Amino acid sequence: MREFIVEADGGSRGNPGPAGYGAVVSDAATGETLREAAEYLGVVTNNVAEYSGLLAGLRAARELDPEATVHVRMDSKLVVEQMSGRWKIKHPGIKPLAAEAVRVFPPGRVTYEWIPREQNKHADRLANEAMDAGARGEAWDASDSRAALDTPGTRPVTPELLEPSGPSERSGPPADAAAGAARARAAEAAAGVADAGGAGADAGNASVGNAPAGKAAADVRAAQAVAAPGTETAAARGPAPAATPSSGWAPADMGPPATFVLLRHGETPLTPQKRFSGSGGSDPSLSDIGREQAEKTAAHLARRGTVQAIVASPLARTRETAGVIAARLGLDVTVDDGLRETDFGAWEGLTFAEVRERHPDDLNAWLSSPDAEPTGGGESFAATANRVAAARDRLTAAHAGRTVLLVTHVTPIKTFVRLALGAPPEALFRMELSAASLSAVAYYADGNASVRLFNETSHLR
C-alpha cells in the first residue's frame, strides 16, 4: 500500500481578506513531489483557507491512489487538533469543510502531525503564489510554481483594493507588532452634507485603517458593532458584542463573514457644486465624469474578482453606477430601499451656505441632534440609522459568508461605518466620502465587525 505525505497551508491577507491555499502531495518513501495544488479563494479567513488547503491535498492524494494511506503535516495547530479529534469543532463555517475532509479517505487511513511553520515552506509558498495570482486577477499556474523553485528570494506581493496594506500573514510582521495597525484618526469638522459632494464646504475628514497581519492580530477587531446609547432603536445601535472563545493558543475563527463593499455612486452634476442631493430631490443621473468613474470602478473590481452580488439604492445615480459594474462583472443588480439617501426636505438642491442663510435655526438643530429633521419634513439621521440598520441585518442574513457590493450614498455609508465602530451620531459629521470611493465592513457570526476605509479615488482618475 502506498503512503503519501500531504503538506497543506492557507493564508488570508487581513483575516478575513484575500486568501488562498497551497497543498503538496509527496511519496513517503522517496520524498518525490507528486502533485501540487493552489487556489485563490477570494475573501475568507485564515482557518477557512487552511481547511481548504487540507481538503485539496487529500483530494489530490486520492486521485493518485484511492487505496493509499496519508500522513498530513500542517503548521495549523487548530486544524491538526480538530481533525485528530482532540479539539471540538464548534464553528458552523468550519464544520462542513472538516466533514468533507473526513469523507475523502476511509477512517483510519489519515493521520495528522503539527509541524513548525519553517517546515511547511512548500505549501506556504504555493498559498502565497495563489494569493498573488488572485491579486493580479489571474488563476494560479503550476508552471509558475515550478519556475519559482529555481528562483531565490520571495515572490512579490501585489497590493490591491480590499487587501490590507501589509503582506500575507506568512511573511508579515509578528502578530503583536501588527495589532497596532488598527487605529482611527478623526479630524475636527464643522458640519457634514450627505450627497452634496462629500461633507460640505466646511467639513473635515476622518479615516479608519484596519490592516493587521497574523492570526492573533487579525482577530483584534477594528471595532465592535455596538453604538453608544442614544436616540436610535436597538436595531440602529447594532448587535450586542459577544465573547470570542479561544482555544488557548489563538483567537477562535469566526468563519467567513458577510462582507459589504460600500461604494458611493459616481459624480452627478450636483456633486462638484456640493449641493444637498438626497432621496427627496431631483434624482439626478450621473455626469460624464460619474460614468467614467463607474467604468473604472467596474474594471478595478473585475480585476479583484471578489464581488459575488450587487445591491443598489433605488435612486437613479446608484442604479446607473451599479448597472455599469454589473455589466462588467456579469451579475444582476438587486434594489434595496434601505440603501437610499436621506430625504433633505426643503434643503434639496441647496448648498450648505444657502441652507445656513435661509434656515439657520433648523440647520443648527440638525447639527446638534440626530432626531432633528431638515426643513420641510425631511428625514432625521436617527430615522436614517434605523432604516440602514434594518437593511444591514436583512442583507447580512441573506448574504452570510459572501462579498456583496452595496452601491449607495454618503449618509448610508457613513452610517454603516458608524454603527460598526460603535461611534456616536455626531461621527457622521467627521467623515467625508469622495464620489466613487470604496469602503468595506465585514460582519462576523459573533456580532463583531471590522471596518476598512479606503476612500481613495486616485485609481479612478
Image: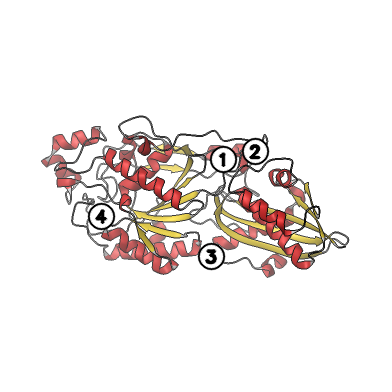
Of the numbered discs 4 and 3, the one sitting upstream in the chain is 3
Residue 256 at what x, y percent from top left? 55, 49
Residue 350 showing in the rendered view = yes
- The numbered mark at residue 250 is 2
The residue under label 1 is which amino acid type?
Asp
Frontmost residue, 60 versus 188: 60
Of the numbered discs 1 and 3, the one sitting upstream in the chain is 3
Tell me if residue 143 comes above or below residue 351 in the rendering. Answer: below
The nearer-to-camera label among 1 and 4 is: 1
Horizontally, residue 339 falls left or right of residue 445, namely: left
Mark 3, residue position:
137
The residue under label 2 is which amino acid type?
Ala
- The numbered mark at residue 271 is 4
**Structural crowding at the residue carrying mark 3, measured as other residues with C-alpha within 10 Å and reported as few (<14), some (14–19) or many (≥20):** some
Horizontally, residue 27 falls left or right of residue 421, namely: right
Q: Looking at the rendering, which quadrant does residue 6 occupy?
A: bottom right
Task: Using the numbered discs, state the Cα–Cα distance from disc 1 to disc 3 in whole angstroms.
Answer: 27 Å
The nearer-to-camera label among 3 and 2 is: 2
Q: Name the residue at 20% across, 39% down.
A: 373
Do the residues under discs 2 and 1 have CB atoms within 8 angstroms?
A: yes
Of the numbered discs 2 and 1, the one sitting upstream in the chain is 1
Residue 280 at what x, y percent from top left? 19, 51
Do the residues under discs 1 and 3 have CB atoms within 8 angstroms?
A: no
Residue 409 at what x, y percent from top left? 31, 51
The residue under label 3 is which amino acid type?
Gly
Circle 1 sits in a helix, a strand or a loop, which is it? loop
